[in-house]
Image (cartoon, rainbow, N blue to C red):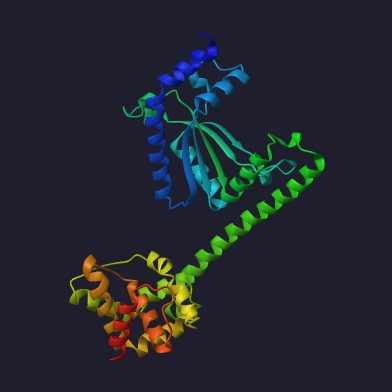
Amino acid sequence: MSQVEDIISQYHHNQELYGHMVDDIEDIIGRILSSNQIKVSNFAIRIKSEETLRKKIMYKHKYHRIEDITDVVACRLITLFESDLDLIVKLLFENFDVVEFLDKRQKQQDDYVGFGYNSIHMIVRFTKERCALVEYAPYRDICFEIQLRTALQHAWAEVEHGLGYKNEYEIPSEIRRRLNRLSASLELLDEEFVRINEDIQVYNQSLEREEKVLKTDINRHSLETYALHCPNLKKLVNELADMHALTVYEDPQMISELRIVRRFHYLGYLYIHEVDELVQKHAQQLKMIGKEWIRLISNKEHQLNYFACLVWVSMMAMIENGKDDPDEILDQDARNKIANYALS
């Protein structure tokens, strides 16, 4: 049997092991990300196909056994922000035995003028401590690859791949200069996204003061903070929940799913203090709207999303302004009933 076929035979013999390994890598890295509250655009793991593996063995005459090939199993982590890359690298160093580390980002190489927007490559394996556990022992001699890049870096790489060039030296010089200019622009965009994310964190922290919230424009964060800290809305939700024996839970995703921010903008409400004035003015009507909402929806679920109170306020705003529901959250009959209750 040739060396190529011998390695391919080992590859097939390990198929079940690779499958278990993929599951364990996904579990470990997934827990690392969630416990550190790191959001990623994509996290994928693949096992190299036989065709690709065969070509690699044939073109590079340096492999003697399947364990010599370090990317049979490989995973790709695509982050939203460039600042998360260094944190993830630190966490991977803490949780795996790093065999090889290559940071190909241009900004790390001042004298480098290269093609495209590159990424971080790591070859790792399970630590000796982890392999001492029986469930991880079979992975003792298997390395795998981890590739890290941001969403913008990944987008560039996809376009780069589509152009059909393997490296910068294959490209005509004029086109290479144009690509390098674009690459620099993407780096600036990545840095600006990081700054925007940091500014959002600072903005959200500033909303902890009630007087600050009332002066803020209506956006998802300000509306969520206002609802959670408004005494009248808290009292209303708790009173109705007790009255109907409902469990209250908080899922702010409702604000986005029902486009509540857009609803207020459509009705001409631009600042939180305008919503607050509506809440103060129509406390009794909001209670009637809430009761009808519960009768139509929440009683069937035996629970009440706290942020439904914002839907009630938006419905009160529509009634007061004589406008139709732009999103038709409820059917026309239900909307008419709610309007009749609020106006009675």
Q: Residue furthest right?
A: 174
- The image shows residue 20 at horizontal and vertical percentages of 37, 31
Q: Is residue 160 left or right of residue 36?
A: right
- Whether residue 30 is visible here, answered yes or no, is yes
Locate the C terminus by quadrant.
bottom left
Q: Hey, which quadrant is residue 304 in on the image?
A: bottom left
Quadrant of the rendered image containing residue 189: bottom right
State whether residue 338 is above or below residue 37.
below
Lateral position of residue 294 relative to residue 147, left or right = left
Disc tally is: 0
Q: On the rendered structure, is 299 left or right of 232?
A: left
Q: Nearer the viewer, residue 225 or 173?
A: 173
- Measuring 43% from the left and 31% from the top, which residue is drawn there? 126
Image coordinates of residue 82 in percent, x first then y, are 58, 51
Residue 95 lies in quadrant: top left
> Relative to residue 307, is residue 273 depicted above or below?
below
